[in-house]
Image: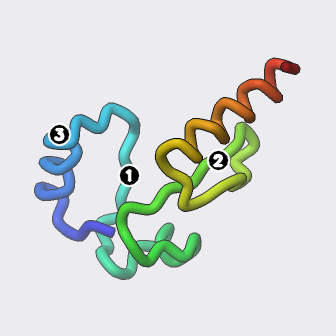
Amino acid sequence: MDSNKEKWEKAIEKDGLTWPNVSDLKGDNNEAAMIYGVRDIPDNFLIDENGIIIDRFIRGEKLQMRLKQLFNEKDGL
């Protein structure tokens, strides 16, 4: 939901975000935010290998437990 490319890139660098980051730089009119109903930052989505959103607003211990569950299911444990 950024609109200033330079500030956005500096924030990525400052925060040490090593994964791919994308933005259409349209601020409050960000197309992905409107599609997925993102109103607040930070927000997060847990997306499966098929691109399906399987969880949202999940952090900390709850996220760790959910990931462990998913990886165990995938490994047949």
Instruction: Identify the residue at the far right of this view.
Output: 76
Which residue is disc 2 drawn over?
47
In the rendered view, would you say 55 is above or below 14? Answer: below
**Residue 13 badge:** 3
Q: Position of residue 24 (x, y in %)?
A: 36, 64
Horizontal relation, residue 11 to residue 44: left or right:
left
- In the rendered structure, the answer to whether residue 58 lies left or right of residue 18 reads right
Disc number lying in front (3 or 1): 3
**Element type at marker 2?**
strand
- Ranked by sequence position, the earlier of labels 2 and 3 is 3
- Residue 51, given in percent of the width and then of the height, sits at 69, 48
Q: Quadrant of residue 23?
A: bottom left
User: Which secondary structure, mark 3?
Assistant: helix
Give the CA separation, mark 3 to mark 1: 13 Å
At a point 54% along the width and 76% down the height, the residue shown is 37
Left or right, residue 23 beside residue 14: right
Looking at the picture, how far across and down is residue 26, in whole percent?
Answer: 32, 73
User: Residue sitting at 38 percent across and 80 percent down?
Assistant: 29
Which quadrant of the rendered structure holds the N terminus?
Answer: bottom left
Answer with mark 1 or mark 2, whichever residue precedes in sequence: 1
